[in-house]
Image (cartoon, coloured by chain):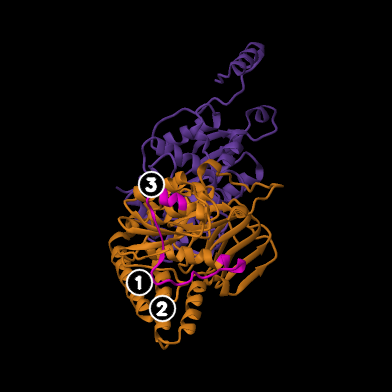
Amino acid sequence: MDKGYIENGFIVDVSNANRTSEIIYELSRILDLPDAQCKKVCLKLGSVDLSATELTSIKALVESMNSEIEFINTSSNKTAQSAEELNIKVAVLENNVPTPEFDADQEKVNQELEKALDKIFGNENSEIKTFGQKKDIKELKEASLAAEDTINDSEEIKDETVNPESQMETVVVEEVKTDKNDVIEEAVQSTLFEETSEKSIYEKFNSELENANKIDGEDIKDIDYNLDDLRKSLRETEKLPTLYIQRTLRSGQSIKSEGNIVIIGDVNPGSEVIAKGDITVWGILGGIAHAGSDGNSYARIRALKMNAIQLRIGDTFARRPDSINIPYIQKTDTFVPEEASVRKKQIIIHKMHES
Amino acid sequence: MSGRVIVITSGKGGVGKTTTNANIGTALAKMGKKVVMIDTDLGLRNLDLLLGLENRIVYTIVDVVEERCKLKQALVKDKKNPNLCLLAAAQTRDKTAVTEEQLKEICEKLQKDFDFILVDCPAGIEQGFQNAVAGASEAIVVTTPEMSAVRDADRIIGLLEAKEEIKSYKLLLNRYRPNMVNANDMMSVDDVVEILSAELIGIIPEDTGIITSTNKGEPIVNDEKSLAGQAYNNVARRIIGEDVPFLNLEEPKGMVAKMKKFFSNLIGKEK
């Protein structure tokens, strides 16, 4: 295969996707970011078999965002054939670094990595590669500088937009219940706290990179170890201590924790649970839950039945829609475990077996 | 603008203070007045439920007092009527979280922007009552035609009279059942007024619709067919100084009247 090189562009690695719909979903999510427009894209497609029609629609999607496909990378012969028909270049990356292999255990970490990449894709202008590749120190430093820039940027924006008078007016974010594929269409844009949530993440990201820079440049193994760490630090709630409560929280009761909270029992309306990490309720969540209370927007809230009056994750806020605003708790026999997380600065609830 | 601060109190619990507050507030707002309701029942708040605003509360009165937010940020606007605002109580704190001076200060600040400040008082005569009354200059004493409620209302009126700030107080008779009064099973309006010797501002009939409206989070004054809703509307009109006669709560008597009622129910046009 030819060797490809891209300038003013980035690599989109969807080689873990098994279906066309997943590829399209991932792509549209990434390309929707304002800084991802007008760029050249290298698409890593993995082993998925794509027909010419499917590839055309992917190409059209990329072009609709004002970007273009520079070349694709695939291990499937069928896809390569389709690409040939459409005059799309099939190539491997110039620096020819083996793609890291993630086994099943790492899949979760991998998802977080994807999220982290989203953040970076949205803000950096220079060429970006996946974290798994063995980069040299110079590249790392560049990435670090770029991250610093984004922090400064976001601070500036924050000063302009956060106006205490107008805050109450904008605290109106409809809770969005949706399937994964419909997220983009159905999600309601939140206007509040847009800039604040990102800052802390970048700070963490940045400090991790600084640590990596201190290590002697020739010892690549050590650096890779740190990159693994960085990947995990983005989901640092796993490291926090967990408070375990085995009773029902009643109206007026409030639980706060520096770490995660697990409640075996219901959380009745009028009570509140506030945690710096994740919140998991083995029962009906009917009160107010605030995960990532120190601003960690990667925190999550899970419950067997999600009936919360308000959900807050990091600095993002969602309230129960008025249409199902029932003051008393709904007891039920059917439980569909749901998880709330922040995506695109909005709280999204999805059924856990779909995640 | 200097708004009127009215405290709605009763002494006894469960006589309908919060329901009265929500309905009078909504009725006044519908007449175009700017109204803010303050829930001072810290730890046992309900006013937000009755208005269906529970899911909108981010900051409470305790957050205002402890300066975690500005007063304006803590005011929750009503879903339908932009003239109506709620300052919610904190659910996870107790009555000691707010002092009389702080409530007085909040009322004074709100007086500048609102025509009416309705303070929902907790049951009892302890700190919660003292706090609620602190900023008010007028009071509405809610009572039901039961001996225990009337006795407690008497006690409350005594306490209100002792307060210099309270310039006037009115009596509101809630959950009134004319047929029981006719059967001599319930104290009549005259009995209650005679015992308490206070000016009456309204009589609200017992209405099962109140329960539904509470569960829906929708004040009953929005339902124009409901007798209780009409009665609350009349109370609101009396508050702004209109002279409104009391509703005739008597059930129609005699065969013809009964038939009339039966048919009107059948057609769905209740008088």
Quarter holding residue B26? top left
> Mark 3 = which residue?
A60
Q: Based on the picture, tell me whether residue B101 belongs to the magenta stretch.
A: no
Same chain for the residues at labels 3 and 1, yes or no? yes
Looking at the rendered structure, the kind of residue marked 1 is Ala
* Residue A52 x, y percent position in the rendering: 45, 46
Say which chain tag 3 marks.
A
Look at the image and tell me whether residue A176 can be seen: no
Mark positioned earlier in the residue sequence (3 or 1) = 3
Report which colour depicts chain A.
orange
Query: Which region shows up in magenta?
Result: A81-108
* Kind of element beneath mark 3: helix
* Kind of element beneath mark 1: helix
Mark positioned earlier in the residue sequence (2 or 1) = 1
Which of the image's four quarters has the C terminus of chain B? top right
Looking at the rendered structure, the kind of residue marked 2 is Leu
Task: State the mark number for residue A209.
Answer: 2
Same chain for the residues at labels 3 and 2, yes or no? yes
Report which colour depicts chain B.
purple
As rendered, which of B87 and A102 lies closer to the eye?
A102
